Structure formats: C-alpha cells, structure tokens
Image: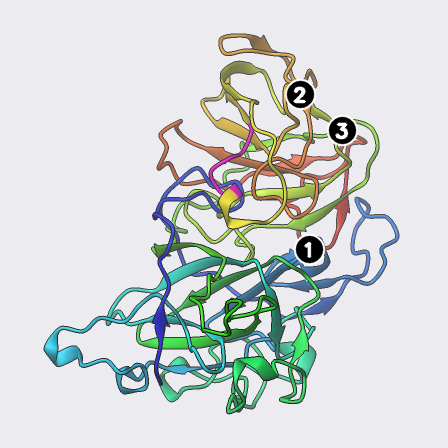
C-alpha cells in the first residue's frame, strides 16, 4: 500500500491533566449499565462506562486500546511490505500514514519491543466504522482476541477484532457506501494504544477542498492533523493503598458530582503520573476545596484554551498543595484567574482555594485531582480515598457513579 508519512508533534505533551512524560498500558473494563450501589450515589441515567471512564463525558473523542473499539476500521499485525518498506535496507515505519487513494489514516507501531500511545486530532470530516464509542462489549465481543493473530486485543467475549473495510474507491467518492459513517465531530480526536508490531486503520478522511487549482491542475493537499506519540511504560502497582491517605471531598456545594474517569481510566489515566487520578464533572465555577491542612506549592492559572484538541495538551491550569502529612495534591483544569491563594499560603481543610474550569485538554468541564509523594515532575501518583461531605465511609470513586 502506498503511504504518505505525516509529521508528528514533539513528544512530551501532557495528556489529560498529565504533567509527566511517561505512559503505561491501560486496563480495559467491560461496558456496564450503571446503577446506584451505595449511599454516596443518587439516581443515575444510563451511562456507557468502559475502561473506568464515562464515554459520554469525552465529547469528540474516540478511544481504542489494542484494537478493542468497534469504530476502528481495522487492527492487526504490522506488515512492512504493505507500506512499501524494506526494513532490511534500513526503512522505518512512519507513526502515521494516509493512503493517497483511499485517504485512510493508519497508525503504525513498527517497534519490536515498545508499546506506544497516540493522541491524534483530525481537523477534517472523518468516516469511521461505527458511532458506538463504548468498547467491544457493546458489539457482542468484537475486539476480543490477540494482537499476535491480527485480531483486536481488548476485553470481551469470543470473536475477532474489527473486520477490514474495502477502500477500493478513490478519495472523491468519500461517502458511506463502504459501510462507514460520519464521526459527527469535527475536529475529532483519537486516543489509541498499540502493542509492538501492530497497526490500526483509524478513519477515512474526507477532504472538502477542491484538490485542483483554477487551471484544473492537481495541487498539494494539506492535511490538518496534530499528534502526540509516546512510549508506554508500565505502572508500578506494588505501592498499595494506605488508609491514612483518606481526605475530604474536594468540591463545594452543588453535588453530587459524576465521576467521569477513575483509577486507571483508559481515556487519559493510563500514565504513571495520572494513573490514580480522579475526574469529577462539575459546572465551571464550582468551588474547589482544600482536602486537608497544608501549604500552597504552585499556582498556574493563566491559560484559557479548552476542548479536546491535541494542541491543548500542554496548556492546563492547576494548583498544588503540600499537605501536612507530606502528600502533594494537585487540582487541574481550574478556571483562569480564579485562585484565592498563592505559593506559600497556608490553607486549612475545607478552605476554598479556586474554582473549577475546563482549561487544557478537557472535553467537558471537570476537576481532575491526583496525589503524589513528591512534587517532582515525574513523580507517580498514589492511590487515595475520599470522604463525603455528609460523612460516612471512605470511598475510591468509580466512573459512572456520583459522589459528594
């Protein structure tokens, strides 16, 4: 298959609220219909929860780990010959490729020993295999199998990964006659994880611009893609939960609040620096509270970009507190210029320190909270529990449930 390499953005971008540079593979949960399970919850509408994140909260985003998503066009083993590569002669695979005839965007992990993660924003209309973003179980197990045999490597029952789609038609015939549907979001952002020596056909790009000039001569097509690609490192889970790391709820009145992504969430919480983070959906301007007594370490509140474009990955707002027990707590996506504190200020448990926002890589307004044992930029997160403002037992929030 002829291919056109696409330049990628510099590595080291921050995914979600991540302020670290390494990643790890995510653990996929089955899709479930959410029902209340304990006293912290209120009545819930049905939500799609897969990989410990709420699909409906990630507007405009499509997530696939190792071929487990029904919207993928295909997923399988990497074949250098299909891309016209001679590895013996030193050819290396591009990270991204767009076939000039079918306009199919492919993601390629040509490495022999490294898992990679990809965040890709496409600023064109795109066609995908299904509008279902909820994971393999919503299609009767599609996506099960192994990457080694060319099928999807996700959770689920029997059956192989997404079947290949025929892209024989040329780019000018970009319709739905090949069984594809419009994604419904422009731009659309794709979040993928691929094991070594695997590849995925992500979407078909529809170019609305005339690819010829006034004289009818072909012109170079400018593809508007932005990407961040990283090596994937494992999370060290030996450091188990310490009951002493139990703190007050971080949000003020207005709850209960939906947990839109929990521990190890497959959307953005699959990095050592964000693995144990928790996301709570809340309106912009909700009061953010100190979860314990401590001292403000750092305030960043100048950014204002919002949405899930990959270019927003570096531009978040946050506040960090060093609690008196030595734990560092970080609040991310906060509202621009909403901080009531500055570095060096002492705070008491329950003090309002700022307001929630939707700044950075943020598909919907929410508070991202995570904790570390140090303030080092590469410090991994630690697991923590929260107490409801109304009292009761401590809990570790799970995606799809409401708390506060």
Front-lying residue, 206 or 79: 206
Check disc 1 and report the residue beneath it: 59
Q: Is residue 234 left or right of residue 164?
A: left
Magenta residues, as a range?
312-317
Check disc 2 and report the residue beneath it: 354
Front-lying residue, 203 or 99: 99
Secondary structure mainly formed by the magenta segment? loop
Determine the residue positioned at 77% across, 27% down. Answer: 252
For the C terminus, the image quarter is top right
Check disc 3 and report the residue beneath it: 286
Front-lying residue, 3 or 310: 3
Residue 350 image position (x, y, % from top left): 70, 19
Front-lying residue, 394 or 230: 230
Comes first in the chain, label 1 or label 2 = 1
Q: In this view, does 268 lie to the left or right of 397?
A: left
Determine the residue positioned at 52% across, 45% down. Answer: 276
Residue 154 visible, this orientation: no
Dot 1 crowding, Cα within 10 Å, few <14, some 14–19, many 20+: some
Comes first in the chain, label 3 or label 1 = 1
For the N terminus, the image quarter is bottom left
Q: In this view, does 218 lie to the left or right of 176?
A: left
Instruction: Tell whether position 306 is magenta.
Output: no
């Amino acid at each position: 298959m002829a291919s056109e390499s696409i330049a990628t953005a510099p590595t080291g971008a921050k995914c979600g609220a991540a302020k670290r540079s390494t990643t790890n593979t995510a653990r996929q949960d089955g899709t479930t219909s959410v029902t209340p399970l304990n006293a912290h919850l209120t009545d819930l509408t049905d939500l799609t929860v897969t990989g410990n994140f709420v699909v409906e909260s990630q507007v405009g985003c499509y997530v696939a780990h190792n071929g487990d998503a029904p919207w993928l066009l295909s997923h399988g083993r990497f074949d250098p010959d299909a891309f016209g590569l001679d590895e013996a002669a030193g050819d290396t695979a591009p990270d991204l490729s767009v076939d000039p005839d079918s306009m199919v965007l492919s993601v390629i992990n040509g490495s022999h020993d490294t898992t990679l993660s990809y965040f890709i924003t496409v600023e064109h209309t795109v066609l995908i295999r299904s509008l279902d973003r909820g994971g393999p179980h919503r299609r009767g197990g599609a996506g099960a199998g192994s990457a080694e045999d060319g099928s999807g490597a996700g959770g689920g029952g029997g059956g192989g990964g997404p079947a290949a789609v025929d892209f024989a038609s040329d780019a000018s015939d970009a319709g739905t006659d090949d069984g594809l549907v419009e994604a419904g979001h422009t731009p659309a952002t794709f979040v993928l994880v691929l094991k070594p020596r695997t590849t995925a056909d992500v979407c078909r790009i529809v170019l609305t611009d005339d690819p010829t000039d006034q004289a009818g001569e072909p012109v170079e097509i400018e593809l508007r893609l932005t990407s961040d690609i990283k090596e994937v490192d494992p999370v060290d889970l030996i450091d188990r939960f310490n009951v002493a790391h139990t703190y007050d709820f971080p949000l003020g009145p207005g709850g209960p609040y939906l947990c839109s992504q929990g521990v190890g969430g497959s959307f953005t919480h699959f990095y050592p620096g964000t693995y144990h983070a928790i996301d709570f959906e809340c309106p912009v301007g909700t009061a953010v509270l100190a979860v314990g007594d401590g001292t403000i370490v750092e305030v960043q509140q100048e950014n204002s970009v919002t949405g899930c474009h990959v270019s927003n990955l570096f531009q978040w707002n946050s506040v960090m507190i060093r609690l008196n027990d030595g734990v560092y707590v970080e609040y991310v996506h906060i509202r621009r210029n909403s901080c009531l504190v500055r570095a060096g200020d002492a705070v008491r448990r329950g003090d309002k320190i700022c307001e929630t926002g939707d700044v950075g890589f943020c598909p919907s307004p929410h508070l991202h909270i995570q904790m570390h044992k140090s303030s080092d930029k590469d410090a991994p997160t630690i697991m923590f529990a929260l107490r409801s403002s109304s009292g009761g037992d401590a809990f570790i929030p799970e995606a799809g449930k409401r708390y506060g």
